[in-house]
């Protein structure tokens, strides 16, 4: 089972290492991890995608909560939430493939952010399914380099 | 007024009412030592190895209930301390360990005696700090004591660079501290407490499972009231020994791998297992899928991560054991009309039967010394002295757990979670500092004793009357026992007959010592030791191949005991 944990942490030296340690010392897997400061002073948000059975996920949640630098842990399981990920994809291009690449980028509402005689660099944002989908279409056309941010997530507000 | 980092360090420790700091000096903490030298409020206790310093601070903490403090130099001083820190971490013991560090501009340069001790100890401390600025120091020390002693206690490390020790800053010690990410739950959820009360009151065969958390939270009185009011039998873990008086008729002694037959059987047949400050360690549960198969489980613990970690819990109850039990006790008043002895009649009949089967025993007719006999005898002759007993790790540790009758908390100190050989002797020294007037006895194996025997010097230097009984079998006995039972008696690397003459060794430090080999000498030698004013080493040469029974093979069900 996959689970996204979003944790608000003190922006202290060593926090990332404490979180990473928690996973490695207990043999839990981190699929992706993303950290950046948020708009409150000295706080950061980490978004961690991990996998395990219910018991392991429960332990992970508790262990994250137990860290002294953790202010808040949110689990994205049953509640409706938005998740996004961004990817930068550098494509080999030539006269034969350019048009096709552009068409795919267009369908996925991506952007070409850098161009050279034999490459395009594409930016695309969406949920992980969308990123996976564009990658599978671009793959046969020759991906040169790929960078994904890993997920960030937020709970949807109640629409009433 | 501005003070140097070193002065702030000392003034802060005074505010925390620290009496003793254990450690060894070095270049990176020489300024701190210079400041310690100039005053008399806090005593520095010089050990002969940093591991021993941390264990001594730990022994001080376990026996007194106050946090222990150690001060180690950078690099090798700090790394030598890690085993002590990890030992305290596994048993949730409050320590504050200060380490010297190279000057801040040199950190990360592989400077002389630099070690990334903050990185190295991240997984064996409750929290750790690097002090980058003298103006942060007082707050960091306050936080360290707060974190170490509250919630589930544990060791906290403060890495203290040399330049920060001499830098000046304004000193004011915070009265209180708030950490927004750290708010332990002390009071149990009322609804949940009510559910647990109901479950306990309606159980036919309840059983109390008492761990070290009960001692850490000073909850022995509340535990005794609960057990006696409701007539619930009690077993403890190794760490819980002393939380409940073992001479009480409700006590089943210790359970687990080397637990009593009656306690292990009771686990398998109880219908409600009430865990109080314990953590379902594999040495207690044996094969998890066959543990307490007939029981619903109540788990009271301050650490939510302990609950449902190893086994399914039906009634989780997060909170401080003492407070939770206090809140719970009056709720049983509505059952005052119930005659619990009557309700539990069948349960006690069953338990009494187990009590009389497969009692802890040893061969009484032997002329050689059996370790169990030595322990029982010491228990007999020290009954009225309220001694502190520490152990090393191995067979002798289990025999002490089985054959010494403990009736009070904080009187039995042992490394449970990490199982650190070399713990017991320095921990005994630490306990003697906490209780200058109480007798302290260390039970050691000959193997373990050699891991920190250099601390004989510390005994003499501070004139501490710690008594050490070496149960000397010339083997790394516990490992040999496994080889005996499960590895076809192939005693690979466990024969340690090559050993010092412990009597001469002790005497070379100026410590009185004696060796005994016959059962007939035991009682008289123990009395001589007890009555001797100073430290004393008794080398009791025991039957070499005596084994600890019962024994549950690792990974087997807890009722699957080898009995002889
Ligand atoms: C530091 C450390 N190293 C190794 C072990 C593994 N070990 C567990 S018990 C034991 C033998 C202990 O021998 P001794 O102290 O003579 O006690 P005995 O079992 O003979 O009573 C060993 C080597 C350990 N627990 N701790």
Image (cartoon, coloured by chain):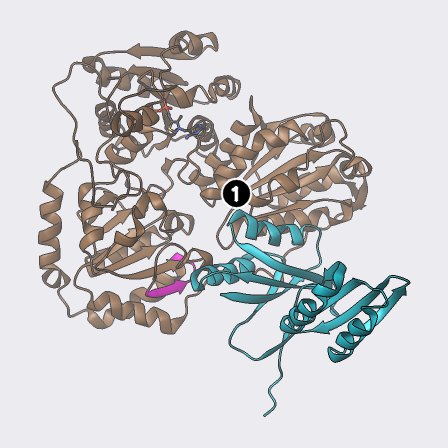
Chain colours: A cyan, B brown
- The chain holding disc 1 is B
Q: Which is more toward the observer, A74 or B149? A: A74
Residue B222 in view of the camera = no
- The residue that appears at 60% across and 59% down in the rendered structure is A31
Residue B525 position, x and y percent, is: 27, 15
B526 horizontally vs B447: left or right: left
Residue B433 x/y as whole percent:
48, 31
| Above or below B24: residue B8 | below
Q: Quadrant of residue B354?
A: top left
Which residue is rendered at x = 48% and y = 37% of the image? B87
Residue A137 visible somewhere in the drawing: yes
Q: Write the start and end of the magenta stretch as one range.
A: B314-321
The residue identified by callout 1 is: B67
Closer-to-camera residue (A107/B259): A107
Residue B5: % across, % down? 75, 40
Residue B533 is left or right of residue B550, and the answer is right
Q: Up-down: is B145 above or below B307?
A: above
- Disc 1 on helix, strand or loop? loop
**Whether residue B497 is situated above or below residue B232 in the rendered picture:** above
Q: Give the quadrant of the C terminus of chain B.
A: top left
């Amino acid at each position: 089972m996959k689970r996204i944990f979003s944790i608000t942490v003190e922006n202290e030296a060593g926090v990332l290492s404490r979180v990473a340690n928690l996973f490695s010392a207990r043999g839990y897997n981190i699929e992706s991890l993303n950290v950046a400061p948020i708009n409150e002073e000295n706080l950061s948000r980490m978004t961690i995608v991990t996998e395990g059975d219910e018991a392991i996920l429960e332990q992970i949640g508790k262990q994250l909560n137990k860290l002294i630098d953790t202010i808040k842990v949110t689990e994205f399981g049953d509640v409706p939430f938005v998740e996004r990920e961004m990817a930068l994809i550098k494509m080999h291009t030539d006269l034969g493939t350019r048009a096709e690449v552009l068409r795919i980028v267009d369908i996925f509402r991506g952007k070409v952010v850098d161009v050279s005689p034999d490459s395009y660099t594409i930016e695309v944002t969406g949920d992980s399914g969308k990123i996976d989908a564009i990658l599978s279409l671009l793959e046969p056309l020759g991906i040169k380099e790929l960078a994904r941010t890993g997920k960030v997530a937020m709970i949807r507000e109640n629409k009433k | 007024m501005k003070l140097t980092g070193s002065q702030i360090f000392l003034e802060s420790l005074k505010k925390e009412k620290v009496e003793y700091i254990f450690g060894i000096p070095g270049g990176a903490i020489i300024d701190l030592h210079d400041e310690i030298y100039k005053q008399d409020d806090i005593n520095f206790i010089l050990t002969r190895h940093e591991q021993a310093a941390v264990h001594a601070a730990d022994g001080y903490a376990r026996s007194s209930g106050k946090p222990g403090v150690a001060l180690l130099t950078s690099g090798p001083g700090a790394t030598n301390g890690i085993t002590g820190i990890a030992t305290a971490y596994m048993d949730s013991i409050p320590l504050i360990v200060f380490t010297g560090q190279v000057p801040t501009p040199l950190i990360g340069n592989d400077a002389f005696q630099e070690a990334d001790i903050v990185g190295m100890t991240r997984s064996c401390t409750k929290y750790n700090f690097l002090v980058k600025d003298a103006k942060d120091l007082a707050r960091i020390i306050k936080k360290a004591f707060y974190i170490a002693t509250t919630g589930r206690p544990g060791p906290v490390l403060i890495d203290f660079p040399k330049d920060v020790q001499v830098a000046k800053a304004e000193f004011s010690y915070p009265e209180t501290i708030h950490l927004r990410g750290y708010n332990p739950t002390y009071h149990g959820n009322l609804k949940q407490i009510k559910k647990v009360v109901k479950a306990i009151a309606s159980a036919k065969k309840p059983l109390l499972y008492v761990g070290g958390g009960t001692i850490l939270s000073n909850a022995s009185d509340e535990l005794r009231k609960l057990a006696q009011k409701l007539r619930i039998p009690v077993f403890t873990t190794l760490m819980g020994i002393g939380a409940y008086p073992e001479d009480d008729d409700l006590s089943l002694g210790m359970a687990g791998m080397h637990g009593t037959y009656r306690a292990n059987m009771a686990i398998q047949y109880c219908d409600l297992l009430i865990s109080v400050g314990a953590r379902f360690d594999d040495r207690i549960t044996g094969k998890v899928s066959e543990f307490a198969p007939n029981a619903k489980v109540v788990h009271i613990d301050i650490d939510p991560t302990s609950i449902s970690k190893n086994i399914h819990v039906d009634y989780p109850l997060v909170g401080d054991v003492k407070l939770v039990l206090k809140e719970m006790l009056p709720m049983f008043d509505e059952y005052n009309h119930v005659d619990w002895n009557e309700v539990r009649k069948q349960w006690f009949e069953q338990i009494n039967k187990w009590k009389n089967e497969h009692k802890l025993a040893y061969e009484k007719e032997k002329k050689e010394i059996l370790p169990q006999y030595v322990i029982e005898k010491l228990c007999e002759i020290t009954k009225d002295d309220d001694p502190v007993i520490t152990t090393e790790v191995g067979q002798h540790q289990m025999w002490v757990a089985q054959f010494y009758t403990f009736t009070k908390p904080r009187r039995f100190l042992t490394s449970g979670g990490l199982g650190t050989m070399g713990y017991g002797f320095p921990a005994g020294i630490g306990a003697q500092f906490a209780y200058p007037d109480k007798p302290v006895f260390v039970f050691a194996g000959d193997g373990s004793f050699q891991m920190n025997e250099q601390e004989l010097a510390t005994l003499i230097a501070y004139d501490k009357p710690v008594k050490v009984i070496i149960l000397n079998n010339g083997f790394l006995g516990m490992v040999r026992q496994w080889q005996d039972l499960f590895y076809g008696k192939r005693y690979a690397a466990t024969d340690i007959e090559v050993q010092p003459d412990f009597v001469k060794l002790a005497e070379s430090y100026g410590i009185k010592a004696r060796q005994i080999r016959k059962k007939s000498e035991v009682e008289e030698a123990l009395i001589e030791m007890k009555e001797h004013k100073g430290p004393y080493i008794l080398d009791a040469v025991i039957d070499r191949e005596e084994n600890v029974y019962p024994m549950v093979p690792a990974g087997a069900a807890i009722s699957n005991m080898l009995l002889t």
